[in-house]
Amino acid sequence: MDAELVQRSKKIRERLVQLGDSLDYAGKRVEIKAIEDQMALATFWDDNESAQKTVVELKALKTIVGPMRELSTSVEDLAALMEMAEEDQSIAEEVAAEVYRLEAILDDLELKALLNGPNDSAGAILSINARDGGTDANDWADMLLRMYSAWAVGQDYKIELLDRQENEEAGINHASIAIRGPMAYGYLKGEEGMHRLVRISPFNSEGKRQTSFAAVSVAPEIDDSIDIDIEEKDVREDRYRAGGAGGQHVNKTDSAIRLTHVPTNIVVQCQNERSQHQNRATAWKMLRAKMARIEEERREAEEERKYATQARTGFGSQIRNYFLHPDQRVKDARTGHYVGNFNSVMDGSELQGFFDSFLRLKAGKQLPQS
Protein backbone atom coordinates (compact mmCIF):
# COMPACT_ATOMS: atom_id res chain seq x y z
CA MET A 1 0.00 0.00 0.00
CA ASP A 2 1.24 3.47 -0.94
CA ALA A 3 2.67 5.18 2.19
CA GLU A 4 1.10 8.52 1.24
CA LEU A 5 -2.38 6.99 1.04
CA VAL A 6 -1.88 5.36 4.45
CA GLN A 7 -0.87 8.70 5.94
CA ARG A 8 -3.78 10.55 4.34
CA SER A 9 -6.26 7.96 5.59
CA LYS A 10 -4.94 8.42 9.13
CA LYS A 11 -5.30 12.17 8.73
CA ILE A 12 -8.92 11.72 7.61
CA ARG A 13 -9.69 9.79 10.79
CA GLU A 14 -8.02 12.47 12.95
CA ARG A 15 -9.92 15.25 11.18
CA LEU A 16 -13.19 13.36 11.61
CA VAL A 17 -12.69 13.12 15.39
CA GLN A 18 -11.82 16.83 15.64
CA LEU A 19 -14.79 17.76 13.45
CA GLY A 20 -17.18 15.69 15.56
CA ASP A 21 -16.04 17.59 18.65
CA SER A 22 -16.27 21.04 17.03
CA LEU A 23 -19.73 20.34 15.61
CA ASP A 24 -20.95 18.64 18.81
CA TYR A 25 -22.03 15.67 16.72
CA ALA A 26 -23.17 13.62 19.73
CA GLY A 27 -25.17 16.52 21.13
CA LYS A 28 -26.87 17.18 17.79
CA ARG A 29 -27.94 13.54 17.55
CA VAL A 30 -29.60 13.87 20.96
CA GLU A 31 -31.33 17.08 19.81
CA ILE A 32 -32.65 15.35 16.68
CA LYS A 33 -34.10 12.50 18.76
CA ALA A 34 -35.80 15.00 21.10
CA ILE A 35 -37.31 16.96 18.19
CA GLU A 36 -38.52 13.82 16.42
CA ASP A 37 -40.18 12.68 19.66
CA GLN A 38 -41.82 16.11 19.93
CA MET A 39 -43.04 15.95 16.31
CA ALA A 40 -44.61 12.54 16.97
CA LEU A 41 -47.03 14.10 19.47
CA ALA A 42 -50.63 14.54 18.30
CA THR A 43 -50.59 18.20 19.42
CA PHE A 44 -47.42 19.14 17.50
CA TRP A 45 -49.19 21.02 14.70
CA ASP A 46 -51.63 22.86 16.99
CA ASP A 47 -49.32 25.88 16.85
CA ASN A 48 -48.42 25.96 13.15
CA GLU A 49 -45.88 28.80 13.38
CA SER A 50 -43.98 27.13 16.22
CA ALA A 51 -44.14 23.78 14.43
CA GLN A 52 -42.68 25.26 11.25
CA LYS A 53 -39.74 26.71 13.22
CA THR A 54 -39.12 23.29 14.76
CA VAL A 55 -39.15 21.63 11.33
CA VAL A 56 -36.57 24.16 10.08
CA GLU A 57 -34.43 23.52 13.17
CA LEU A 58 -34.57 19.76 12.53
CA LYS A 59 -33.57 20.24 8.90
CA ALA A 60 -30.59 22.37 9.95
CA LEU A 61 -29.43 19.71 12.41
CA LYS A 62 -29.76 16.97 9.81
CA THR A 63 -27.61 18.87 7.30
CA ILE A 64 -24.75 18.30 9.76
CA VAL A 65 -25.62 14.96 11.37
CA GLY A 66 -26.56 13.15 8.14
CA PRO A 67 -23.25 13.76 6.31
CA MET A 68 -21.30 13.15 9.52
CA ARG A 69 -22.98 9.76 10.02
CA GLU A 70 -22.34 8.77 6.40
CA LEU A 71 -18.74 9.98 6.66
CA SER A 72 -18.13 7.95 9.82
CA THR A 73 -19.41 4.82 8.07
CA SER A 74 -17.30 5.54 4.99
CA VAL A 75 -14.16 6.00 7.10
CA GLU A 76 -14.73 2.57 8.67
CA ASP A 77 -15.26 1.09 5.20
CA LEU A 78 -12.03 2.75 4.03
CA ALA A 79 -10.10 0.96 6.76
CA ALA A 80 -11.48 -2.38 5.57
CA LEU A 81 -10.75 -1.47 1.95
CA MET A 82 -7.13 -0.65 2.82
CA GLU A 83 -6.70 -4.02 4.51
CA MET A 84 -7.92 -5.69 1.32
CA ALA A 85 -5.51 -3.56 -0.74
CA GLU A 86 -2.58 -4.94 1.29
CA GLU A 87 -3.30 -8.33 -0.25
CA ASP A 88 -4.58 -7.15 -3.65
CA GLN A 89 -2.73 -4.18 -5.18
CA SER A 90 -5.36 -3.86 -7.92
CA ILE A 91 -7.64 -2.26 -5.29
CA ALA A 92 -5.14 0.57 -4.64
CA GLU A 93 -6.73 2.78 -7.32
CA GLU A 94 -10.12 2.35 -5.68
CA VAL A 95 -8.58 3.29 -2.30
CA ALA A 96 -7.06 6.46 -3.78
CA ALA A 97 -10.43 7.53 -5.25
CA GLU A 98 -12.16 6.95 -1.92
CA VAL A 99 -9.51 8.98 -0.04
CA TYR A 100 -10.05 11.91 -2.42
CA ARG A 101 -13.83 11.65 -1.99
CA LEU A 102 -13.70 11.60 1.81
CA GLU A 103 -11.26 14.52 1.92
CA ALA A 104 -13.70 16.58 -0.19
CA ILE A 105 -16.61 15.74 2.15
CA LEU A 106 -14.47 16.68 5.15
CA ASP A 107 -13.55 20.01 3.54
CA ASP A 108 -17.26 20.80 3.09
CA LEU A 109 -18.18 19.84 6.66
CA GLU A 110 -15.26 21.78 8.10
CA LEU A 111 -16.58 24.85 6.31
CA LYS A 112 -19.98 24.29 7.91
CA ALA A 113 -18.21 24.14 11.27
CA LEU A 114 -17.12 27.75 10.67
CA LEU A 115 -20.79 28.78 10.68
CA ASN A 116 -20.81 29.00 14.47
CA GLY A 117 -21.97 32.59 15.03
CA PRO A 118 -24.98 33.24 17.29
CA ASN A 119 -27.31 33.81 14.31
CA ASP A 120 -25.58 31.79 11.59
CA SER A 121 -28.24 29.08 11.57
CA ALA A 122 -31.04 31.64 11.04
CA GLY A 123 -32.73 32.70 7.85
CA ALA A 124 -31.52 35.89 6.19
CA ILE A 125 -33.20 39.15 5.27
CA LEU A 126 -31.34 40.40 2.22
CA SER A 127 -31.86 43.93 0.87
CA ILE A 128 -30.53 45.35 -2.39
CA ASN A 129 -30.40 49.05 -3.25
CA ALA A 130 -29.40 50.58 -6.59
CA ARG A 131 -26.60 53.11 -6.15
CA ASP A 132 -24.44 55.07 -8.65
CA GLY A 133 -24.90 54.34 -12.34
CA GLY A 134 -28.37 55.59 -13.28
CA THR A 135 -30.68 53.12 -15.01
CA ASP A 136 -27.81 50.65 -15.33
CA ALA A 137 -27.58 50.54 -11.53
CA ASN A 138 -31.32 49.82 -11.27
CA ASP A 139 -30.95 46.99 -13.76
CA TRP A 140 -27.85 45.73 -11.90
CA ALA A 141 -29.74 45.66 -8.59
CA ASP A 142 -32.43 43.53 -10.24
CA MET A 143 -29.76 41.19 -11.65
CA LEU A 144 -28.33 40.70 -8.16
CA LEU A 145 -31.79 39.96 -6.80
CA ARG A 146 -32.19 37.22 -9.40
CA MET A 147 -28.69 35.90 -8.64
CA TYR A 148 -29.34 35.41 -4.92
CA SER A 149 -32.80 33.97 -5.63
CA ALA A 150 -31.30 31.44 -8.07
CA TRP A 151 -28.70 30.40 -5.49
CA ALA A 152 -31.42 29.99 -2.85
CA VAL A 153 -33.55 27.84 -5.16
CA GLY A 154 -30.49 25.68 -5.89
CA GLN A 155 -30.03 25.16 -2.14
CA ASP A 156 -33.72 24.21 -1.77
CA TYR A 157 -34.25 27.29 0.41
CA LYS A 158 -37.54 29.17 0.62
CA ILE A 159 -37.78 32.77 -0.60
CA GLU A 160 -40.32 35.40 0.42
CA LEU A 161 -40.50 38.83 -1.21
CA LEU A 162 -40.83 41.45 1.54
CA ASP A 163 -40.53 44.67 -0.45
CA ARG A 164 -39.85 45.66 -4.05
CA GLN A 165 -39.79 49.12 -5.60
CA GLU A 166 -39.66 49.12 -9.37
CA ASN A 167 -37.73 51.74 -11.31
CA GLU A 168 -39.78 53.52 -13.99
CA GLU A 169 -37.28 52.77 -16.79
CA ALA A 170 -35.85 49.37 -15.85
CA GLY A 171 -34.88 47.22 -12.87
CA ILE A 172 -35.51 48.17 -9.26
CA ASN A 173 -34.71 50.94 -6.84
CA HIS A 174 -34.85 48.61 -3.87
CA ALA A 175 -35.91 45.10 -2.88
CA SER A 176 -35.87 42.98 0.26
CA ILE A 177 -36.33 39.23 0.44
CA ALA A 178 -36.27 36.64 3.19
CA ILE A 179 -34.21 33.53 2.43
CA ARG A 180 -34.99 30.64 4.76
CA GLY A 181 -33.00 27.45 5.08
CA PRO A 182 -30.18 25.86 7.10
CA MET A 183 -27.33 28.34 7.65
CA ALA A 184 -28.81 30.85 5.18
CA TYR A 185 -27.62 33.86 7.19
CA GLY A 186 -24.26 32.26 7.95
CA TYR A 187 -23.53 31.96 4.23
CA LEU A 188 -25.03 35.26 3.11
CA LYS A 189 -23.78 37.68 5.76
CA GLY A 190 -20.44 38.03 3.98
CA GLU A 191 -22.29 39.49 0.97
CA GLU A 192 -22.92 42.80 2.74
CA GLY A 193 -21.28 45.69 0.93
CA MET A 194 -21.02 47.27 -2.51
CA HIS A 195 -21.14 45.17 -5.68
CA ARG A 196 -19.67 46.75 -8.84
CA LEU A 197 -20.55 45.88 -12.44
CA VAL A 198 -18.61 46.97 -15.54
CA ARG A 199 -20.26 46.39 -18.92
CA ILE A 200 -21.34 47.95 -22.21
CA SER A 201 -24.56 49.70 -21.23
CA PRO A 202 -27.71 48.30 -22.86
CA PHE A 203 -29.37 51.63 -22.03
CA ASN A 204 -26.81 53.79 -23.87
CA SER A 205 -27.38 54.19 -27.61
CA GLU A 206 -23.69 55.00 -28.10
CA GLY A 207 -22.64 51.65 -26.66
CA LYS A 208 -20.38 53.12 -24.01
CA ARG A 209 -18.93 51.21 -21.09
CA GLN A 210 -20.79 51.84 -17.84
CA THR A 211 -19.83 51.17 -14.22
CA SER A 212 -22.78 50.49 -11.94
CA PHE A 213 -23.05 49.95 -8.20
CA ALA A 214 -25.60 48.19 -6.00
CA ALA A 215 -25.46 47.88 -2.22
CA VAL A 216 -26.36 44.63 -0.48
CA SER A 217 -27.35 44.50 3.19
CA VAL A 218 -27.91 41.25 5.10
CA ALA A 219 -29.48 40.71 8.53
CA PRO A 220 -30.51 37.57 10.44
CA GLU A 221 -34.20 36.70 10.53
CA ILE A 222 -34.73 36.26 14.24
CA ASP A 223 -37.84 35.09 16.07
CA ASP A 224 -39.64 36.75 18.94
CA SER A 225 -37.89 34.58 21.53
CA ILE A 226 -34.69 36.59 21.01
CA ASP A 227 -34.70 39.82 23.00
CA ILE A 228 -33.88 42.90 20.92
CA ASP A 229 -34.13 46.16 22.84
CA ILE A 230 -35.99 48.71 20.68
CA GLU A 231 -37.86 51.59 22.31
CA GLU A 232 -41.04 52.39 20.39
CA LYS A 233 -40.51 56.09 21.08
CA ASP A 234 -37.27 55.86 19.09
CA VAL A 235 -39.06 54.60 15.97
CA ARG A 236 -40.84 56.90 13.51
CA GLU A 237 -43.55 55.32 11.39
CA ASP A 238 -44.50 56.68 7.97
CA ARG A 239 -47.38 55.38 5.89
CA TYR A 240 -47.53 55.69 2.15
CA ARG A 241 -49.38 54.27 -0.81
CA ALA A 242 -47.96 50.99 -2.05
CA GLY A 243 -47.10 50.78 -5.73
CA GLY A 244 -49.32 48.60 -7.86
CA ALA A 245 -49.43 47.04 -11.30
CA GLY A 246 -51.95 49.57 -12.56
CA GLY A 247 -55.69 49.41 -13.25
CA GLN A 248 -57.78 47.65 -10.62
CA HIS A 249 -54.63 46.52 -8.77
CA VAL A 250 -53.52 50.03 -7.79
CA ASN A 251 -53.51 50.34 -4.00
CA LYS A 252 -55.94 53.10 -2.97
CA THR A 253 -54.95 53.18 0.71
CA ASP A 254 -51.77 54.10 2.56
CA SER A 255 -50.98 50.48 3.43
CA ALA A 256 -47.20 50.57 2.97
CA ILE A 257 -45.12 51.11 6.11
CA ARG A 258 -41.71 52.72 6.56
CA LEU A 259 -39.99 52.55 9.96
CA THR A 260 -37.04 54.76 10.91
CA HIS A 261 -35.01 53.99 14.02
CA VAL A 262 -34.00 57.55 14.84
CA PRO A 263 -30.90 56.89 17.04
CA THR A 264 -29.23 54.75 14.35
CA ASN A 265 -31.02 56.13 11.26
CA ILE A 266 -31.87 52.58 10.19
CA VAL A 267 -34.76 52.58 7.71
CA VAL A 268 -36.88 49.56 6.76
CA GLN A 269 -40.02 49.43 4.68
CA CYS A 270 -42.63 46.93 3.57
CA GLN A 271 -45.41 47.24 1.02
CA ASN A 272 -45.79 43.67 -0.18
CA GLU A 273 -48.32 42.37 2.35
CA ARG A 274 -52.07 42.66 1.82
CA SER A 275 -52.83 44.98 4.72
CA GLN A 276 -51.26 47.82 6.66
CA HIS A 277 -51.26 45.63 9.77
CA GLN A 278 -49.28 42.88 7.99
CA ASN A 279 -46.87 45.39 6.47
CA ARG A 280 -46.27 46.92 9.90
CA ALA A 281 -45.60 43.49 11.46
CA THR A 282 -43.15 42.58 8.70
CA ALA A 283 -41.42 45.99 8.91
CA TRP A 284 -40.89 45.54 12.66
CA LYS A 285 -39.49 42.08 11.99
CA MET A 286 -37.05 43.61 9.50
CA LEU A 287 -36.07 46.33 11.97
CA ARG A 288 -35.37 43.77 14.70
CA ALA A 289 -33.19 41.88 12.22
CA LYS A 290 -31.20 45.03 11.38
CA MET A 291 -30.68 45.77 15.08
CA ALA A 292 -29.51 42.20 15.66
CA ARG A 293 -26.99 42.67 12.86
CA ILE A 294 -25.66 45.85 14.49
CA GLU A 295 -25.16 43.98 17.77
CA GLU A 296 -23.37 41.20 15.92
CA GLU A 297 -21.08 43.72 14.16
CA ARG A 298 -20.25 45.22 17.55
CA ARG A 299 -19.18 41.81 18.85
CA GLU A 300 -17.17 41.14 15.68
CA ALA A 301 -15.41 44.50 16.05
CA GLU A 302 -14.44 43.59 19.61
CA GLU A 303 -13.01 40.27 18.39
CA GLU A 304 -11.06 42.05 15.64
CA ARG A 305 -9.58 44.48 18.14
CA LYS A 306 -8.74 41.59 20.43
CA TYR A 307 -6.79 39.81 17.72
CA ALA A 308 -5.61 42.96 15.90
CA THR A 309 -7.33 41.89 12.68
CA GLN A 310 -9.09 43.81 9.96
CA ALA A 311 -12.02 41.92 8.44
CA ARG A 312 -14.54 44.67 7.86
CA THR A 313 -17.30 44.10 5.36
CA GLY A 314 -19.52 46.99 6.34
CA PHE A 315 -22.22 48.57 4.23
CA GLY A 316 -20.59 50.80 1.64
CA SER A 317 -17.35 48.84 1.23
CA GLN A 318 -16.72 47.49 -2.27
CA ILE A 319 -16.48 43.74 -1.91
CA ARG A 320 -16.78 42.28 -5.40
CA ASN A 321 -16.25 43.27 -9.03
CA TYR A 322 -18.26 41.80 -11.90
CA PHE A 323 -17.07 42.32 -15.49
CA LEU A 324 -18.84 41.84 -18.80
CA HIS A 325 -16.37 44.08 -20.65
CA PRO A 326 -13.64 43.87 -21.85
CA ASP A 327 -13.82 40.23 -20.69
CA GLN A 328 -16.16 38.16 -18.53
CA ARG A 329 -15.07 37.51 -14.97
CA VAL A 330 -16.02 37.98 -11.34
CA LYS A 331 -13.45 38.62 -8.62
CA ASP A 332 -13.85 39.15 -4.89
CA ALA A 333 -11.90 42.15 -3.62
CA ARG A 334 -11.39 40.63 -0.16
CA THR A 335 -10.49 37.00 -0.80
CA GLY A 336 -9.23 37.13 -4.39
CA HIS A 337 -11.63 34.31 -5.32
CA TYR A 338 -12.05 34.38 -9.09
CA VAL A 339 -14.55 32.92 -11.56
CA GLY A 340 -14.00 33.38 -15.29
CA ASN A 341 -17.63 32.77 -16.25
CA PHE A 342 -19.89 35.73 -15.46
CA ASN A 343 -23.13 33.89 -16.23
CA SER A 344 -22.31 30.91 -13.99
CA VAL A 345 -22.09 33.32 -11.05
CA MET A 346 -25.26 35.20 -11.96
CA ASP A 347 -27.29 31.99 -12.32
CA GLY A 348 -26.17 31.00 -8.80
CA SER A 349 -24.27 27.87 -9.80
CA GLU A 350 -20.80 29.22 -8.92
CA LEU A 351 -21.79 31.69 -6.22
CA GLN A 352 -21.13 29.27 -3.34
CA GLY A 353 -17.38 29.45 -3.95
CA PHE A 354 -17.41 33.13 -2.95
CA PHE A 355 -19.24 32.29 0.29
CA ASP A 356 -16.79 29.49 1.12
CA SER A 357 -13.69 31.58 0.42
CA PHE A 358 -14.99 34.36 2.67
CA LEU A 359 -15.65 31.87 5.49
CA ARG A 360 -12.06 30.65 5.21
CA LEU A 361 -10.80 34.24 5.22
CA LYS A 362 -12.80 35.09 8.34
CA ALA A 363 -11.64 31.93 10.11
CA GLY A 364 -8.02 32.77 9.35
CA LYS A 365 -8.34 36.40 10.43
CA GLN A 366 -9.91 35.45 13.74
CA LEU A 367 -6.82 33.51 14.81
CA PRO A 368 -4.50 35.21 17.29
CA GLN A 369 -1.59 36.94 15.65
CA SER A 370 1.84 35.42 16.34
Image (cartoon, helix red, strand yellow):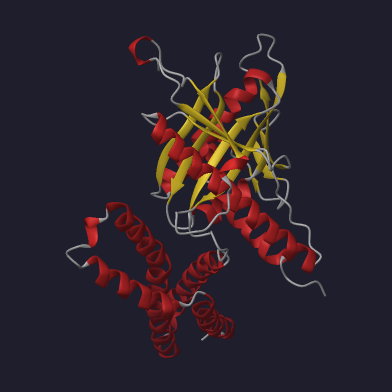
* Res 114 visible: yes
Vertical relation: 198 (above or below) 53? above
Relative image position of residue 142 (x, y in whole percent): 54, 28
97 or 235: nearer the eye? 235
44 or 208: nearer the eye? 44
**In this figure, what is the number of numbered marks?**
0
Question: Quick one: quadrant of the C terminus?
Answer: bottom right
Relative image position of residue 102 (x, y in whole percent): 47, 72
Horizontally, residue 94 falls left or right of residue 216, namely: left
Horizontally, residue 38 falls left or right of residue 25, namely: left
Residue at left 72%, top 39%?
316
Vertical relation: 64 (above or below) 134? below
Relative image position of residue 330 (x, y in whole percent): 65, 40
Residue at left 45%, top 73%?
98
Vertical relation: 356 (above or below) 163? below
Residue at left 33%, top 57%?
50
Relative image position of residue 123 (x, y in whole percent): 47, 51
238 or 306: nearer the eye? 238
